[in-house]
Amino acid sequence: MPQIIDGKAISAQIKDEVKAQIAALNTQGKKVCLAVIQVGDDPASSVYVGNKKKACAYVGIESLSYELAAETTQEELLELIRELNAREDVNGILVQLPLPEQIDEDAVIRAIDPKKDVDGFHPQSVGALCIGQPGFVSCTPAGIIQLLKRSGIEIAGKECVVIGRSNIVGKPMALLLLRENGTVTVAHSRTRDLREVTKRADILVVAVGKPKMITREYVKEGAVVIDVGIHRNENNKLCGDVDYEDVAPVCGAITPVPGGVGPMTIAMLMYNCANSVSL
Ligand code: NAD
């Protein structure tokens, strides 16, 4: 049987570390405050925002909540961001994506002060990651590095294949694995022979956004398989981009869905917020 990488336990450990860090900051008279903005009332977004606020309460981060109407204009949202950028008592600003179609997401991301960009989506944060300078790192890929390290999985020198090249997951994931001295390949929708590429991987990160697409034919025996996907199947049960039952018997380690990558994203958001004080 493979090693099951326990994202629930590891994320709880990180949240407790952040909690201790916040308590230490409080004793120095420093508070940490995250502003969370949601535009509209998309049910999935509301669940994510609720979970983020709950995590803030747990670790001792104050959260300010801005619930804006779905018809909010881009200028109104940018004005709020400018206000929050200027407030000294606000350390982090998070705008829940996706945004309604009248709002340009890129313009919103660029408006956030990079010192408060706890999601790590600002071009300056991405550029810093690219050239190995300090800055906020996108939470999901940062969480995957923590999952690997804290499960005793060595990255240096390994063949790492990332399927997916999104700005939020695939690209920062590739950069982080490279920073950890992995030999990194990025596969995507135009990759000619996906199986031939993924079969080389010692560490395979799957962020393809297609339920159960990755079966054992894509996986080298003994490989570490990290499943970023989150989907609901026909029975309303959660599943990932990896066909877990098919792949688990042949791989060396695997993240389950739920309980793998999912909980790490919020834990790393808390980690970024705590570190926003020193940036
Ligand atoms: P995306 O749709 O932006 O990107 C998918 C990528 O997969 C694209 O770069 C595309 O080139 C590639 N792709 C599509 N079809 C392919 C194919 N047949 N062969 C090879 N590559 C192909 O998705 P995303 O935002 O990167 O998210 C990926 C998955 O991770 C989704 O299921 C999403 O729900 C999930 N996700 C989970 C978390 C979390 O916290 N666990 C966070 C973000 C995203």
Image (cartoon, grey):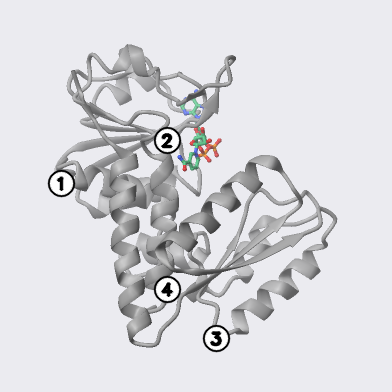
Q: Secondary structure at mark 4?
A: helix
Residue 276 is tagged as: 4
Q: Name the residue tied to disc 1.
A: 156
Question: In whole angstroms, how far apart are the C-alphas of marks 2 and 1?
Answer: 21 Å
Question: In whole angstroms, how far apart are the C-alphas of marks 4 and 3?
Answer: 12 Å
Question: In whole angstroms, how far apart are the C-alphas of marks 1 and 4?
Answer: 28 Å
Percent across and percent down for residue 158 are 17, 38
Q: Nearer the viewer, mark 1 or mark 3?
A: 3
Among numbered discs 3 and 2, the one appearing first in the sequence: 3
Percent across and percent down for residue 240 are 45, 26
In the rendered view of the protein, which quadrant contains the C terminus? bottom left
Q: In the depicted view, which residue is nearer to us: 277 or 127? A: 277
Residue 228 is tagged as: 2
In the rendered view of the protein, which quadrant contains the N terminus? top left
Mark 1 and mark 2 in contact (Cβ < 8 Å)? Answer: no
Q: Name the residue tied to disc 3.
A: 88
